[in-house]
Image: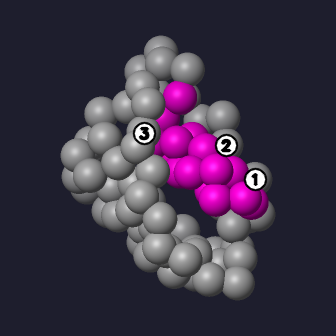
Amino acid sequence: MEYVYRTQGTCSTNIELNVEDGVVKEVAFWGGCNGNLQGLSRLVKGMKVEEVIKKLEGVRCSGRPTSCPDQLCHALHEMGY
């Protein structure tokens, strides 16, 4: 399932993701810290959604209550995971 999530409270503005059978197939962040988000996208590719959420939910950035990794988890929850 291809999905676009509008982030809140982060430098990135959107997350475009594709999940099939509970596995992350593709993730792309719009804006934000390019190198870090490319790395994050590559690391979660092929991971089970539950594992991504377990590892990344609640990560904070620069004193903010959220981060790009945390927003990825919000997107996955919004998708029904």
What residue is rendered at 70% in x and 84% in y? 21
| Residue 13 circle label | none
Residue 1, quarter of the rendered image: bottom right
- Nearer the observer: mark 3 or 1; the answer is 3
Q: What coloring was used for the rendering?
A: one colour
Label 3 – label 1 distance at C-alpha: 19 Å
What residue is rendered at 42% in x and 26% in y? 9
Please, is residue 30 above or below residue 17 in the view? above
Magenta segment boundaries in residue numbering: 66-81
- Nearer the observer: mark 2 or 3; the answer is 3
What is the three-letter code of the residue carrying label 3?
A: Thr
The quarter in which the C terminus is drawn is bottom right
What residue is rendered at 47% in x and 65% in y? 3
Classify 10 Å Cα crowding around label 3: few (below 14), some (14-19), many (20 and above): many
Labels 3 and 1 touching (C-beta < 8 A)? no
What is the three-letter code of the residue carrying label 2?
A: Glu
| Magenta segment includes 21 | no
The residue indicated by pointer 2 is 57
Classify 10 Å Cα crowding around label 1: few (below 14), some (14-19), many (20 and above): few
What is the three-letter code of the residue carrying label 1?
A: Lys
Residue 76, quarter of the rendered image: bottom right
The residue indicated by pointer 1 is 54
| Magenta segment includes 67 | yes
